Amino acid sequence: MRDPRPQVLVLAQHDAFRAALREGLEGVDLQFARSAAGVVEALEPLPDVVVVEATADEPEAIALVQQLRHSHPQLPVVLTGVGLDDAVRALRAGAYDALVDSTDVDPLRATLDRAV
């Protein structure tokens, strides 16, 4: 039987981001990966949403959005920690949402609620 909590796979490169999500997203089953390859490997079973902390490498994050849109078009992908230009690129690449601030968990929670 599947866990009723939303299943969220997170590409998180910073420990502080992981800790903030663990603290701020109660009731969400979080699984973490440290690289785009780690996200692709962790897609079984398919999560409800993928969150990508893009602060380290925006072009890699946008490439991951494109890859996931191609392989799993129904899977919402949310980028966080992107600049405004990269947010627009991410949305054009098929991201469900792109959030500029990765330190504020409330907008991410609202986005996850809409995506699930």
Image (cartoon, rainbow, N blue to C red):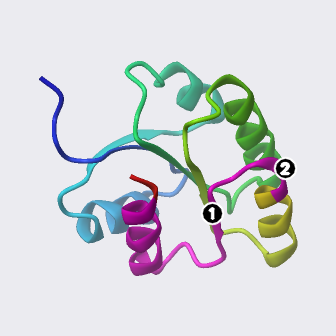
Is residue 96 visible from the viewing direction of this image? Answer: yes
Quarter residue 90 falls in: bottom right
Is residue 10 visible from the viewing direction of this image? Answer: no
**82 relative to 15, above or below:** below
- Asked whether 97 falls inside the magenta stretch, the response is yes
Q: Residue 82 in the image: x percent, y percent?
A: 72, 68
Q: Residue 4 in the image: x percent, y percent?
A: 16, 42
Q: Nearest the camera: 9 or 112?
A: 112
Residue extent of the magenta highlight: 92-114
Q: Nearest the camera: 64 or 49?
A: 49
- Position of residue 49 in the picture relative to residue 94 (left or right): left
Mark-to-mark CA distance, 2 and 1: 16 Å
At horizontal 28% and vertical 47% (from top left) the residue drawn is 6
**Residue indicated by mark 1:** 97
Quarter residue 75 falls in: top right
Q: Residue furthest left?
A: 1
**116 relative to 88, above or below:** above
Q: Residue 69 in the image: x percent, y percent?
A: 70, 35
**111 relative to 93, above or below:** below
The 10 Å Cα crowd at callout 1, few under 14, some 14 to 19, many 20 or more, is some
- Position of residue 52 in the picture relative to residue 45 (left or right): right
Q: Earlier in the sequence, mark 2 or mark 1?
A: 2
Could you tell me which secondary element the residue under label 2 belongs to? helix
On residue 59, which mark appears?
2
Q: Residue 15 in the image: x percent, y percent?
A: 43, 57
- Asked whether 78 falls inside the magenta stretch, the response is no
**37 relative to 18, above or below:** above
Could you tell me which secondary element the residue under label 1 belongs to? strand
At horizontal 28% and vertical 71% (from top left) the residue drawn is 24
Specify the amino acid type for callout 2: Pro
At horizontal 83% and vertical 67% (from top left) the residue drawn is 88
